[in-house]
Image (tube, rainbow, N blue to C red):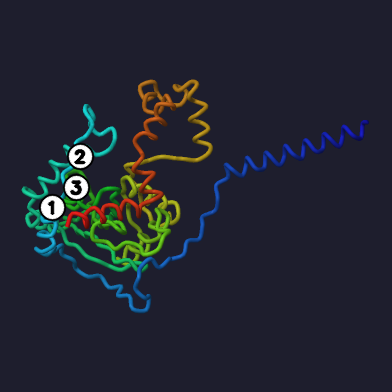
C-alpha cells in the first residue's frame, strides 16, 4: 500500500513538473528567427537592376480621362436605410458626394505638382521596385545630420509626412541636430510594386527595409512608424537592433500571453494596473472586445479574402462600361 502511494505521488510530481515546464516555455523569450532574403518580384534575379533611379509622378491624361468616364458611367447608388450613418458600412449618400468631387472638382495635375515637391526615387529590393522620398537638409548650419526612416501605415501613403518633412529637415532653435529623411511607399502601396507570391507580412517587410536602408548606404538610423509602419518597425528593431539608433511609434502595444493574463486579472481591480482617469481606455473588457468585433469586419475580410475585395471592385467597374 505504501509503495502504491509512493508511485502515485511520484507520477503526480512528474505531471506537475511537466506542466510547470510547459507553462515556463510559454513565457520564455524565443530566439530570433533566421529570415531569408526572399525574392518577392516577378523578374529574374540575374536581370534585376538594383541601381537608384530618380522618379517623378506623371499620370497620362488618358488615364485621368478614363477615370472620369468610369465615374460618369457608374450605376445609381442604392439609398441607405433610414436613420443609418456608417453603422453598416460606407454610407452611399457620402459616397455620392465623393464620386461627384472626383468627377467635377479634383484637379489631379495640380495635386501631381504638389506630390512632386520632394525628391523621389526608386530602387529594387528583393525583386520589388520600391518608391521613396529622400530629403537631405539643404543647410545643416553645423548641426549633426541624423538619418530617419519614416514608415506609413494602412490606408495611408507617403503623403502623411508632407507637412512634417520640412520641419525635420530644417534646423530648429535650441536643437543641435537635423534629420535626413527617407520615406518609402510600402510594397503594394502608392508607386511601390506588390509581391507576386504570398508571405510578405510585417516581419518580412522588416527584412526588406533593412536591405533597403543598406542599399541606400545607411548602417545605423532612427525609425518612426504608425499603424502597419509601427508593426514593421517593431519587428525591425527586434530582429536587427544594432542598426537602429532609436524608435518612435504611433502604435505601442504588447500582445504576449503574460500581458493578456495581466489585463484580465486586473479587470477585477483596474486601478492596480492604471490610474483611475485611464481605466476607461482599457475596461470594461466586454465593451472593448464588442467594439473591436463590431468595427473590424473590414480587417477580417482583408486579412482572409483580400482577392475577393479586389476582384469585386474590378468586376463592378467592368460592368459599368
Q: Do callouts 3 and 2 mark residues in contact (Cβ within 8 Å)?
A: no
Q: CA distance from mark 3 to mark 2?
A: 40 Å
Q: Nearest the camera: 96 or 49?
A: 96
What element does badge 1 sit on? loop
Q: Is residue 22 left or right of residue 205?
A: right
Q: Earlier in the sequence, mark 3 or mark 1?
A: 1
Q: Quadrant of residue 130?
A: bottom left
What element does badge 3 sit on? loop
Residue at the image position 92 percent from the left and 31 percent from the top: 2
Q: Earlier in the sequence, mark 1 or mark 2?
A: 1
What element does badge 2 sit on? loop
Residue at the image position 33 percent from the left and 75 percent from the top: 48
Mark 1 neighbour class, 10 Å CA radius: few under 14, some 14 to 19, many 20 or more:
few
Furthest residue toward right: 1
Disc number at residue 51?
none
Q: Do callouts 1 and 2 mark residues in contact (Cβ within 8 Å)?
A: no
Residue at the image position 39 percent from the left and 35 percent from the top: 293
Q: Nearest the camera: 178 or 120?
A: 120
Q: CA distance from mark 3 to mark 1?
A: 39 Å
Q: Is residue 36 left or right of residue 134?
A: right
Q: Which residue is mark 3?
A: 164
Q: CA distance from mark 1 to mark 2?
A: 15 Å
Q: Quadrant of residue 108?
A: bottom left
Q: Which residue is mark 2?
A: 78
Q: Which residue is mark 1?
A: 73
Where 167 sits versus 117, above or below?
Answer: above
Amino acid at each position: 500500500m505504501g509503495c502504491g502511494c509512493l508511485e502515485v505521488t511520484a507520477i503526480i510530481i512528474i505531471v506537475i513538473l511537466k506542466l510547470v515546464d510547459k507553462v515556463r516555455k510559454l513565457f520564455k523569450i524565443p530566439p530570433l528567427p533566421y529570415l531569408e532574403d526572399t525574392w518577392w518580384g516577378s523578374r529574374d534575379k540575374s536581370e534585376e537592376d538594383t541601381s537608384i533611379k530618380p522618379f517623378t509622378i506623371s499620370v497620362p491624361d488618358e488615364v485621368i480621362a478614363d477615370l472620369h468616364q468610369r465615374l460618369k458611367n457608374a450605376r445609381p447608388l442604392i439609398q441607405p436605410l433610414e436613420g443609418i450613418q456608417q453603422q453598416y458600412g460606407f454610407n452611399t449618400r457620402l459616397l455620392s458626394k465623393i464620386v461627384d468631387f472626383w468627377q467635377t472638382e479634383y484637379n489631379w495635375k495640380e495635386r501631381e505638382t504638389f506630390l512632386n515637391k520632394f525628391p523621389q526615387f526608386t530602387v529594387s529590393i528583393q525583386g520589388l521596385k520600391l518608391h521613396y522620398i529622400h530629403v537631405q537638409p539643404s543647410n545643416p548650419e553645423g548641426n549633426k545630420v541624423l538619418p530617419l526612416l519614416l514608415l506609413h501605415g494602412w490606408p495611408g501613403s507617403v503623403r502623411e509626412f508632407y507637412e512634417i518633412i520640412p520641419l525635420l529637415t530644417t534646423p530648429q532653435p535650441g536643437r543641435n541636430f537635423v534629420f535626413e529623411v527617407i520615406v518609402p511607399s510600402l510594397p503594394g502601396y502608392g508607386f511601390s510594386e506588390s509581391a507576386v507570391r504570398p508571405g510578405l507580412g510585417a516581419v518580412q517587410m522588416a527584412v526588406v527595409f533593412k536591405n533597403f536602408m543598406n542599399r541606400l548606404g545607411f548602417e545605423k538610423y532612427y525609425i518612426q512608424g504608425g499603424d502597419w509602419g509601427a508593426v514593421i518597425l517593431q519587428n525591425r528593431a527586434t530582429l536587427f537592433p544594432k542598426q537602429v539608433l532609436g524608435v518612435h511609434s504611433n502604435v505601442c502595444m504588447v500582445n504576449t500571453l503574460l500581458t493578456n493574463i495581466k489585463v484580465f486579472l486586473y479587470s477585477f481591480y483596474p486601478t492596480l494596473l492604471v490610474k483611475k482617469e485611464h481605466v476607461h481606455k482599457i475596461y470594461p473588457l466586454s465593451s472593448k472586445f464588442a467594439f473591436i468585433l463590431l468595427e473590424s469586419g473590414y480587417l477580417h475580410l482583408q486579412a482572409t479574402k483580400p482577392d475577393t475585395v479586389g476582384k469585386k471592385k474590378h468586376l463592378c467597374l467592368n460592368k459599368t462600361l
